Amino acid sequence: MTFLRLGLCIVGVYSMFLLWAIAQERLSVPFPSIDGETSDKFRSPLFMGTCQSAMSTLSALIYLFIRRKSGQSLPQLLGLELTPSKSASNGTAASNGSANSTYNGTTHTNGHSHAHPLAKSSARFSPVSLLLRYLQCAVFITSAAPFGFAALSYITYPAMVLGKSCKLVPVMFMNVLLYRRKFAAHKYVVVAMVTAGITMFMGFGKEKPGKPGSLKNGNGELSMYTQLIGLTYLLVNLLVDGATNSTQDEIFARYKVTGQQMMFWINCFSTLLTSSISILPLPYIPVLHPNASGTELQGALEFITEHPSVVMSLAQFAFTGALGQLFIFETLQHFGSLTLVTITLTRKLFTMLLSVVVYKHTLTPGQWAGAGVVFAGISVEAWVKRKDVHAKRVIQEKEKAKLKTL
């Protein structure tokens, strides 16, 4: 049964997020109009975010009700009220059991389990402060997503996937900047390897995404200035994602919540934020509101009317992203963060390979070498984590043996 569950989780994570990646890349290129004579790009990233966050909110809520315990109240179900436990009443620390969270198809892992004695948690638990933390994460996610989508107009999708695989860099940076945390020496080696690999991938690349002629140099390729814009957008996306992950780590450290509860609230707030912004008559704002006139919602609906083929990609993007998150949390709950890190690491590699095959990208030997350096660096991080967890388990087994002898 255990192997069957693990197999289902692996298949679920792979299938959902590989399909999600295909839909995301498809949404970044032009769609044919209904008359078949013209084509245009979908320029409503906040509407995309609304579709996915709304579906994720619904999925998380359904999941929570399915797994609801007998006698559990609605506030307890949604993580706004502490649930007394036997171990807590006996003075034993209760672990939140959460070490990971995922949003817009992307995985964040804090790699720690935090102890929460009920008495201490009750003293500092505040639903209002918890909801404000969730809102903070939602603001970060809403701000980051458009930059990631805009970067696809300046860099290829394989470069985007490789960059998104390197979240350790901005996560470390934002943890140090916001919460003054320190990291082990090997993490800085990993950061150096990742940075070197990304530099190799971008430096040896020849393929450029199609852009208007004004952005191209005399050889018909994108100028270095244009590529720098794409890298800047990607960096902003990663930095804000790093701030999101750092805040999620802080939530798990301070509050007794589960990943599904966090998934529900952050996606709920994200839906409210993006929906509210979508109906505001904002002026043209690069990246955040690229429509020249009207509201974001109006522009999205007009585009759907003129380019109906976009509906299938939007539905695939929202549906697979939402289900993918549930498979992520199911894996975390039953097999732990190390198994999840291994699955998501290899999934990103296959995402890049699938993009190369499906959309016929051309990578140079130097780019393959750069990708290898990046994934080698991330693999070092996963190996060290596995080693640390194994050492902790050995210590725990020894402690249990001592208790039995007593």
Image (cartoon, rainbow, N blue to C red):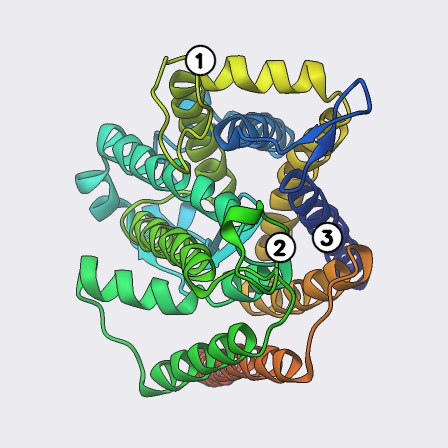
Disc 3 from disc 1: Cα separation = 34 Å
Q: Give the side of residue 4 with respect to residue 276, left or right.
A: right
In the picture, the quarter occupied by the C terminus is bottom left
Nearest to N terminus: mark 3 or mark 2: 3
Q: Nearer the viewer, residue 304 or 272?
A: 304
Q: Quadrant of residue 277?
A: top left
Q: Secondary structure at mark 1?
A: loop
- Which of the two marks, 3 or 2, is nearer to us in this view? 2
Quick one: label 3 or label 1, which is nearer the N terminus?
Answer: 3
In the image: residue 186, left or right of residue 359:
left
Question: What residue is pinned by disc 1?
Answer: 294
Outermost residue toward the front? Answer: 218
Q: Amino acid at mark 1?
A: Gly
> Residue 187 has which mark?
none
Disc 2 from disc 1: Cα separation: 28 Å
Secondary element type, mark 3? helix
Q: Which dot marks residue 18?
A: 3
Give the number of the disc on residue 209: 2
Give the percent coordinates (x, y) of residue 75.
Answer: 40, 24
How far across and how far down the image is residue 117, in percent?
28, 52
Q: Quadrant of the N terminus?
A: bottom right
Q: Is residue 320 at all visible to an observer of this figure?
A: yes
Q: Nearer the viewer, residue 144 or 121?
A: 144
Task: Report the residue at 19% width, 57% height from top.
Answer: 178
Instruction: Name above or below for residue 310 compared with residue 123.
Output: above
